[in-house]
Image (spheres, rainbow, N blue to C red):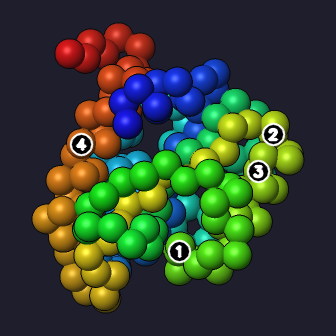
Amino acid sequence: MLKTLSERLKGRVFLVGIGNTLRSDDAAGPELIERLGGKVEADLLDAGEVPESYLGRITGRHPDTIVLIDAAELKAAPGTAAIIEIEDIKGKSLSSHQLGLDLFMRFLQAETGADVFLLGIQPRSTGFGEILSTEVFETIGYLEELFQKVLPAQGVVTN
């Protein structure tokens, strides 16, 4: 995944965490965004459960690459992460959020011309009141390190 992300994360990058922090692994996106604060050269946004509320904020930054990070039904082992293209989402319910992610992604792409894709993380559970599962917690740690290598903040040295 490191090679793929390093090839895709070009120009001005905007990372958008999507999810409900009260619903266990659905908090994966916001959790990763929080951990990356000050550690990467990218715009960061915790969009919570309603990313469509932030369309103007995202498009106003004129990003070249937009990565949505969300818990997604990948039909894989918990903690599995995968890059998902817009065309792979159409008509599928990968996420539990209001506006279909494919429509949201298509709008962002049309308005900005950016490369827009989803970094989905397979949840173990999205029940209320639970903490992140061990598998998703470990994946978030891996992704945090990966983004720091690919998008190091100026003045921050990574191994």
Tag 2, which secondary structure? helix
Where does label 3 land, which residue?
Answer: 108
Where does label 2 land, which residue?
Answer: 112
Quadrant of the image for the C terminus?
Answer: top left
- Dividing the picture into quarters, in which one does residue 62 lie? top right
Residue at (85, 46) in percent of width and height: 111
Which is closer to the viewer, label 2 or label 1? 1
Which is closer to the viewer, label 1 or label 3? 1
Residue 13 screen position, x and y as percent: 59, 32
Residue 117 appears in the rendering:
yes
- Residue type for callout 2: Thr
Disc 2 to disc 3, how far (Cα)?
Answer: 6 Å
- Residue 26's label in the rendered image is none
Q: Classify 10 Å Cα crowding around label 1: few (below 14), some (14-19), many (20 and above).
A: some
Residue at (32, 33) in percent of width and height: 146
- N-term-proximal mark, 2 vs 1: 1
- Residue type for callout 3: Leu
Tag 1, which secondary structure? loop
Tag 3, which secondary structure? helix
Where does label 1 land, which residue?
Answer: 95
Residue found at the very far left of the displayed protein: 134
Where does label 4 land, which residue?
Answer: 142
Are the residues flagged by discs 2 and 3 in contact, CB closer than 8 Å?
Answer: yes
Are the residues flagged by discs 2 and 1 in contact, CB closer than 8 Å?
Answer: no
Disc 4 to disc 2, how far (Cα)?
Answer: 29 Å
Q: Seen in the image, is 148 located left or right of residue 59?
A: left
Which is closer to the viewer, label 4 or label 2? 4
